[in-house]
Image (cartoon, helix red, strand yellow):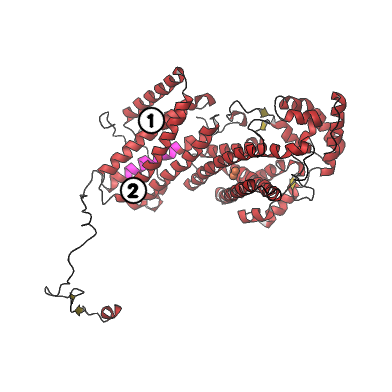
Amino acid sequence: MKRFIQHEELARDSRFIRQTNAVATVLASLPDDVDKVVAVFEQLDPMIAQSVIGTAAEALYDEYGPAFGLITLNEPLDPNQTETLGARMRLVLRMHGIFAGELQALEGAGRSLWDFPDAPWEFKMNMARQCWDEARHVQIFEKLLHHVGGEIGMFPEATFLFECACADDPAQRVAGVNRALEGLACDVFRDMIKFATETQDDLMRQSIDYVLADELTHVRFGSEWVKEFTKDDPERFKAARDFQREVDKQFSFGGARSAREDAAIPIAWDDRLEAGFTEEELNELSEVSGGGPSRQTLRKAAEILGERHRAKTGRVAEVAQ
Amino acid sequence: MSEGKSEGKSQVTAKGRMYPGMSQDERTVFEPYSAFDIPADLRTLHGRYDVVSTALRVRNFRYAEEWMMMMMGGWLATIPELPAKTGLAKVVWETAQAADILGKRLPELRCGRKAATASESANKGFADFIEAVSEPESPDLTIEKLTGIFDVLKPHLIQVYEKTGRETDQICDAPTIELLEDIVRKARRHVSWGKEVLDRLCDTDAKRQRRQQRSSQLRAQLEVCGGVTGELTTASA
Ligand SMILES: [Fe+2]
Ligand SMILES: [Fe+2]
């Protein structure tokens, strides 16, 4: 078995379909300019249209056009908003995305065992433990996906997470996976717990609370191993930090996950502190993640794109978002 | 109670002497009675392996567990069947724990404090065998991947661990016996899970044939190299 695989090589059963990571890459660097955002989405339109065929996202595309992701994933979960298709699908889409993320986290941890055979034993123990944890997370989110009315494969899967975070250098791998992505998981899960509490969904609240506890542990693995792998090597340390910052930026979804007031997913400050991030790092993360377009910009762009799409297809708009 | 002791005297009561004195007639009144008497300890001293050879076996075992854990970790990404992926991840963790406790035994066997992460293949043949087990890569080879581990390697290890447990000094080397028993208990669970998955995956004659072929190939290779400790003979297998 070779070492270092590409994200295209992640094995899936027949329920899954892939989404090109190009869309996610572009979304990560959108400017705060309505016209430019519109232009980017119009350019991506054929690719997005192709990727939703035969999935539950097709209905979202029909309704909102190529920017349906802005109406679903970039908006906060709101228990009081259920009247539109976008609001109804938001939770299922997010749950499906988390499920896929857990799957890739499992595969990433497993590959760290095979890709770095000479790594210290304690590192292997941590990664082996993480394999089991992520496998349980896959099982948990499969059940939660059913719980909210979804099913595996109903949306296309982007393997962006594996692609971005699985660097060939172990220091960068743990910086990307265990600090940037596990940190993101802390933000997402804290937000989900808040939503579950508001909707009095104790099944969801309790299970994600346990998952969050595991993720904190994984961040700690990352913090320790970045330090260990880069000790006495400031250049390698800097490269790992830069890599982490890059992944943090890509996974801020243009500010949707940030410390900004209009963020759909706020930074889980306290959880991250407990996991070993420093205040300084969190301030830096706020800066890196908050740079994308404002929610107002994205809403306006989504509105224009929706109108143009409906004009093209002759569909009538929904009441409101 | 502590009074007599603190005075340094052997307390003599109406019932007799509580602590031995210096002369023959100053023995205590207690009948010889030891934990070994009830139940009778039928274990005898001396086993097949001395400290050095037990330490070598432990390093051999650890080599197998460590590599098994790493290759299964690598396969998590290339196995498409979801329950096989998630189930295998738990086996990864428990196999890592097996390697870990084997390693922790090494410093206790006079291998040095840093020996806890030492793994050693019995011979080149076993290292080649491990490489052969780890070879399948593509997502249509789940049967070949799982057969190597659950039909061949893990059952072989269970057999050798149990044999080692029976043959080593039952008292002197009891810590090795105990840890092997723990590993075997979980490994049996792994094997029955793996076989169940394989039974389910091999739902046609052609697939059953693939499983059969893979396992006889690997078994033959295992026998040639002598297994995890290099001393397997067809008769002892
Ligand atoms: Fe996870
Ligand atoms: Fe995690």
Q: Is residue B231 above or below residue A227?
A: above
Q: Which residue is mark 2?
A: B178
x, y percent for residue A273: 65, 56
Q: Nearer the viewer, residue A237 or A130?
A: A130
To which chain does the residue with label 1 belong? B
The amino acid at mark 1 is Val
The first of marks 2 and 1 along the sequence is: 1
Q: To which quarter of the image does residue A35 belong?
A: top right
| Start-end of magenta stretch | B55-68
Residue B55 visible to the viewer = yes
Element type at mark 1: helix
Q: Residue at x 65, y 27 (%)?
A: A17
Residue A29 visible to the viewer = no
Q: To which quarter of the image does residue B27 belong?
A: bottom left
x, y percent for residue A138: 58, 39
Q: Nearer the viewer, residue A22 or A185?
A: A185
Q: Give the position of the C terminus of chain A as an image quadrant.
A: top right
The amino acid at mark 2 is Glu
Q: Which residue is mark 1?
A: B152
Q: Nearer the viewer, residue B198 or A293?
A: B198
Measure how far apart labels 2 and 1 are at the Cα level. Answer: 24 Å
Describe residue A15's horizontal placement relative to residue A258 as left or right.
left
Callout 2: 10 Å neighbours few (<14), some, many (20+)? few
Labels 2 and 1 in the same subunit: yes
Q: Is residue B16 above or below residue B136?
A: below
Q: Residue furthest left?
A: B25
To which chain does the residue with label 2 belong? B
Pointers 2 and 1 in contact (CB under 8 A)?
no
Q: Quarter for ligand 1?
A: top right
x, y percent for residue A257: 73, 45
Q: Is residue A177 above or below residue B139?
A: below
